[in-house]
Image: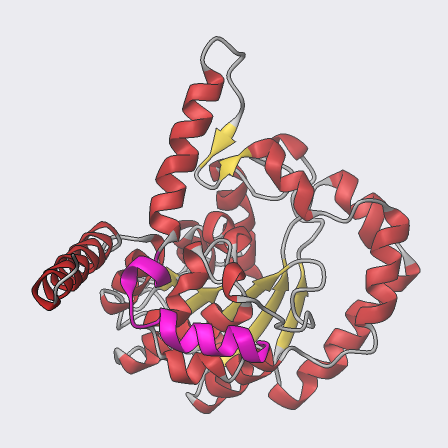
Amino acid sequence: MLTVRKLVLTAAVLLAGLLAMNLVFAYLTQNSVPRRVMRRARESQSASVLALGNSLVASGFDNTAFDAGAGLAAPRASVNLGLGAASPVEHLLLLRYALAQGMRPRLVIYGFYDFQLTAPGVFTTSDLIGNNAMVYYVEPFYARGFLILSLHDAIEFRAMQLFPMLADRGAAWAKIEILRRDLAQQGMPLERSNQFGRASDFSLLEAANAEDFRRQCRSSMKLPLAPAVSELLRQASSAGAMITVVEMPMRQAHRSQFYDTACWSQYVTRIGSLLEPYRAGFIDASAWIQDDSLFADPLHLSAAGAEQFSQRLGSALDPKSVNLELAPAKESR
């Protein structure tokens, strides 16, 4: 017979178990990728140049090579706050976090590819996993204003942000997925991988074919900048920073099939007009890396490719034009 005492004890055990699980998740995620990037922001308060973007920036911006190309000296050099598998909402949160830590960059570099700048921020709570989960623990009420959620997902969002085991559930799934892939590799040819996962997976992030890309291009031509992107540009400008938006390097196959089209040229022209109110510069670096062997996978630069791209980017951005602090002796180029 179920008595009140047994009911209370059962509820107490359940609550204790839930509390323990939440503490375990909080411990496991204390060194998650977003938190490591946030730590880098805290440790780089004197940086003059701040690079933001998704994994293409995280892997492609080599701050040492950029500093050498731009003639910047520590401590007022550059810092890479790129975050893989993240949307402009997380990029905006990282900018705000860096500014809140006292960073006052003279230049903000925002890297993008394809239609990232105008893609609407339509999400479900199932999308807010992995690195996207930082919206639950970094200014969640502010971040909520840039997430287009259904009523059901909006209610879930409010509830899930209170519990680490729900907000950071991706930490457990990531470990399970790594274990599953390791087991699947037993006795099979080794698959090429990098810091972001299997190299072959990133071809899935490209358009299926040229017609699909043109379809996306035509629909994107009618869109304004995504709200999080426009707010990022506005806040960077308000903080006194110059802004440069960079079209990141792409492989020859991506350029020839997608970027060497009239539609993409028109889209880039429209992007230029959308950037004008923020007085943001634009650099088309998509063809800067001609050697496909300098890409680690269909989208990301290798370490050697990142060094080559970043040094050229540093050289292209004249520090004097953005009032950066130069090294004592800067070689002429």
Q: Which residues are magenta?
A: 149-168
- The x and y percentages for residue 148 are 59, 77
Q: Residue at (50%, 66%) from the top-left corner?
A: 125
Q: Does the magenta run of residues contain 157?
A: yes
Does residue 213 appear in the picture of this structure?
yes
In this view, which residue lies farthest toward the front?
1
> Where 126 falls versus 159 (above or below)?
above
Residue drawn at the location 53% of the way across and 87% of the way down = 234
- In the figure, 102 relative to 289: above or below? below
* Residue 220 placement, left or right of 35: right
In depth, the one of 41 and 26 nearer the eye is 26
Quick check: can you spot residue 82?
A: no
| Percent position of residue 145, x then y | 51, 85
Relative depth, front residue between 285 and 154:
154
Q: Where on the picture, by quarter, is residue 225?
A: bottom right
Picture coordinates of residue 297, whole percent (x, y): 59, 35
Q: Is residue 152 magenta?
A: yes
Left or right, 328 with reference to 23: right
